[in-house]
Image (cartoon, rainbow, N blue to C red):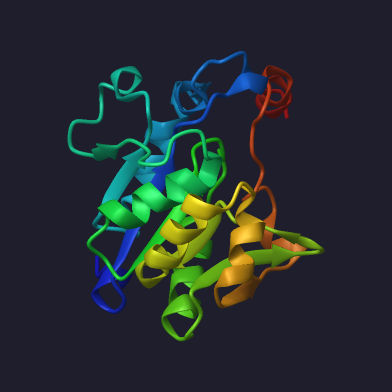
Amino acid sequence: MEHLCNKCQFTAAILAGGKNSRFGGKTKAKMMIDGRPLIEKTIRVLETVFDDIIIITNRKDELPGFKNIRMYADIYHNRGPLGGLHSALTNSQREAVFMLASDMPDISARIIRRQLAEFAGKQADALLPQHDNFIEPLHAVYRKSILPELDKYLAESQKLAIREFLNQVRVDYFRISNIEKQNVFININTQEDLNNYLNT
């Protein structure tokens, strides 16, 4: 398969860190779906699109079964997804990073390919899916060139929402219809969310 990475260099970064406090402190990437850990399912989808995949986690010892996937910890600790994005951009050698949360069980390779292709044709620093009035900063493409701006932001600001940082860079949106998105952007935050997902 020809990877889109040949046209515009991408790393896929799975954010698998975090305190997971709403999930009882358990690592959400390890939740069992379809008989295997969710992160394994995620990697299988990403491997059809990317030739470079990394995991951002401060719990490497909890993910011992992925020796072929490079793992990196946060450089700025306790900064949430922004810290994960910073680590991903720092440790990628590619032009841009596709950053994905580890708790999204229904990601679509087709939609990811479309998103990457649209990013490759734009001058934006970040491309986020937009549906209805929602944006998806954890299913988004970020250009490595924003790293100095992010480094400065994390050193100076106490506002940790990705949306706050995005005010500092050029953002564009990948628009997607409700019919098209289906469950692509669903994420699992609690045990109840997981139970509901498994029972649908």
Q: Residue furthest left?
A: 68
Asked whether residue 22 is in view, the answer is: yes
Q: Position of residue 200 (x, y in %)?
A: 73, 30
Q: Residue furthest right?
A: 133
Q: Position of residue 58 (x, y in %)?
A: 37, 28
Residue at x 68% of width, y 29% of height: 197
The answer to which image quadrant residue 5 occupies is: bottom left
Where is 138 relative to 101, above or below? Answer: below
Between 86 and 97, which is closer to the camera in this rendering?
86
Q: Residue furthest front?
A: 156
Q: Position of residue 99 (x, y in %)?
A: 45, 53
Between 90 and 135, which is closer to the camera in this rendering?
90
The answer to which image quadrant residue 170 occupies is: bottom right
Residue at x 38% of width, y 33% of height: 57
Q: How many marks?
A: 0
Residue at x 54% of width, y 39% of height: 80
Between 53 and 184, which is closer to the camera in this rendering?
53
Residue at x 66% of width, y 58% of height: 163
Q: Quadrant of the N terminus?
A: bottom left
Asked whether residue 136 is in view, the answer is: no
Q: Is residue 40 left or right of residue 71?
A: right
